[in-house]
Image: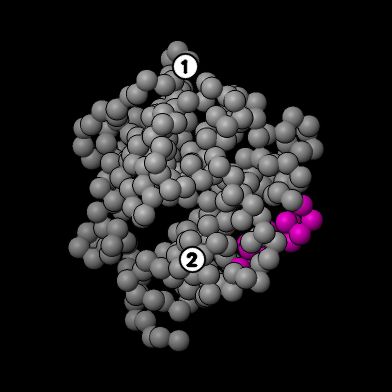
Amino acid sequence: MSEHHYHPPKTWVWNTTEAGKFSNINRPVSGPTHEKTLPVGQHPLQLYSMGTPNGQKVTILLEELLAAGVSTAEYDAWLISIGAGDQFSSGFVGVNPNSKIPALLDNSINPPIRVFESGAILLYLAEKFGHFLPKDIHARTETLNWLFWLQGAAPYLGGGFGHFYHYAPEKIEYAINRFTMEAKRQLDVLDKQLAKNRFIAGEDYTIADIAIWPWYGNLARGELYEAADFLDITSYRHVQRWAEEIASRPAVKRGRIVNRAWGEVQLAERHSASDFDGLAL
C-alpha cells in the first residue's frame, strides 16, 4: 500500500491549477460559460450528444426504432465535444441544466419537450413510439428494474473504476481495489441474470439491453478502459455471449458510432441514413 499524506482541509477550495486531465471541464458550479445557440436540423428529434457509452444508448435506440420501421424516429445528431466544453454553452444548458450528454429536444410537440439523462431519454422514446418496452406489467417492471439498475451502477464503473484505473494521473491502490471489486460484483450480477435469460429482462430485447450494453457489453468485449485482462472478463461467459449477440445487430453497429469523433470509424454528426454509406461497420 503506497503512503499518502493528504489531509482534507476544514473547507474545500477549488484548485484550478491542479485538477488533472479534466480540469477544463470539471468545476464546482453549474450554468453556461459562454453564449452559443444549438444547431437545429430538419427532423423533429434533435439529439445533442457524444459517442460515449451514455451517448450510445440513445443513438442505438433511435437506430433500432428506425430499423423497426418507425420512420418518425428520424433524427439529427449533433456532436457535443465535452473535452472542448460544448456542454457549457447557453444553448446546451437550456436543454440540460446539468450539462451532461446526451440531451434531446422533441420539436414534434408545441412547445418542444426537452429530455435529459440517458435513462429518461430511453424511457421517453420507448413510450413515445411503443417499442422495446413491454406492455405486460410484469415484463415492463422487470425492464425498468434493470434500466434503473444501470443508472445507479454505471457511475461506479465509469466515474469509479474507469477513472481511477484508466484516467487518474496517480494510481491509488485503495481506489482501484474499491471500484474493481464493485465492477466485478456488477458483472457477476449480470452474468447470473443472463445465465437464466437470453436478454437482460427476459427473452425479449428491450431498453434494458440498450442501456446496459454500451457500458458492460463494451467492457466484456475488451473495448472499454483496456481492462479486459485486469477484470478477468472471460470468466463472465454469459455476459460475453449476450454482449456479442447485441453487438451483431445492424442498428447497434450504426448507433454506436454516431457522434464519435475518434477511432477508425467515425460519424461526428448524423442527419440521415445515407450518412452511414461507405463506413466499415
Is residue 199 shown to the viewer in this render?
yes
Q: Does the magenta run of residues contain 186? A: yes
Local secondary structure at mark 1 = loop
Magenta segment includes 214: no
**Front-lying residue, 249 or 46:** 249
Residue at the farthest front position = 278
Q: Position of residue 206 (x, y in %)?
A: 66, 40
Give coordinates of residue 194: x percent, y percent: 73, 56
- What residue is drawn where x is 62% and y is 70%? 234
Q: Which residues are magenta?
A: 184-197
Q: Residue at x 71, y 49 (%)?
A: 199
Residue position for label 2: 161
Image quadrant in which you'd find residue 24:
bottom left
Amino acid beneath label 2: Phe
- Residue 238 position, x and y percent, is 70, 61
Point out the image quarter for the N terminus. Answer: bottom left
Q: Which is more N-terminal, label 2 or label 1?
A: 1
- Residue 99 seen in the current view: no
Left-right relation of 119 to 92: right
Viewed as shown, does residue 128 lie left or right of 3? right
Q: Magenta region's main secondary structure?
A: helix
Residue at label 1? 108
